[in-house]
Amino acid sequence: MSKLEHAGDSRTVSPETATAPAARTAASMVAALVIGEEGGLFWVLAVVGLFVIVLWRGISIAKAEREYFGSLLALGLTASIALQAVINMGVTVSLLPTTGLTLPFLSYGGTAMVVNLAFIGVLMNIWASRQK
């Protein structure tokens, strides 16, 4: 049988062009897997430690901000980065289902990198405006 037919659909897909649904999301876990495999426990703990530092600094910026909006903004941006990292790490060790999220600052994904760097830039701006 050279063609596969979808149930309830008249379109056909050849086996040569069929792709697995999770093939694209596997590329997002490459950085975490390479760090863990090549660097061992030391580098994995270093990466997790850096994410903990980002979380700690973001929360301290949110607590030190005098304006309510700035505090909530700093907390939301920090939570977004931390949650994305936790979900990606959970997917990497097979505790969570595959989601397609990238590991912030490390994994494949140009748009995700730009957005995460913008988040850090806004956090730095909140911190700098607090010191004036």
Image (cartoon, grey):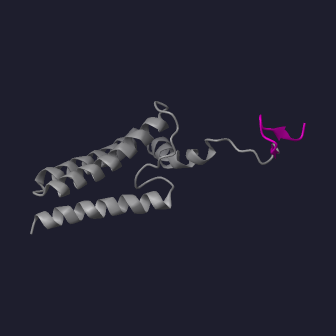
Q: Where is residue 72 shown, x and y percent of the image?
A: 21, 51
Q: Where is residue 16 shown, x and y percent of the image?
A: 81, 46
Circle count: 0
Tell me which residue sits at (41%, 40%) in the image: 87
Q: Where is residue 31 shown, x and y percent of the image?
A: 49, 49
Q: Main secondary structure of the magenta part?
A: loop
Give, as a single range, the part of the protein colored magenta.
1-13
Tell me which residue sits at (19%, 62%) in the image: 126
Q: Where is residue 121 shown, x and y percent of the image?
A: 29, 64
Tell me which residue sits at (14%, 54%) in the image: 68
Q: Which residue lies furthest to the right in this view?
A: 1
The answer to whether residue 4 is magenta is: yes
- Residue 117 found in image quarter: bottom left
Answer above or below: position of 70 versus 8: below
Residue 8 in the figure: left or right of residue 40: right
**Quadrant of the snapshot with the C terminus:** bottom left
- Residue 69 found in image quarter: bottom left
Tell me which residue sits at (19%, 58%) in the image: 70
Q: Residue furthest bottom?
A: 132
Residue 86 in the figure: left or right of residue 1: left
Of residues 2 and 48, the one drawn nearer to the viewer in this rendering:
2
Q: Residue furthest top?
A: 95
Residue 57 in the figure: left or right of residue 30: left
The answer to whether residue 103 is magenta is: no
Of residues 114 and 44, the one drawn nearer to the viewer in this rendering:
114
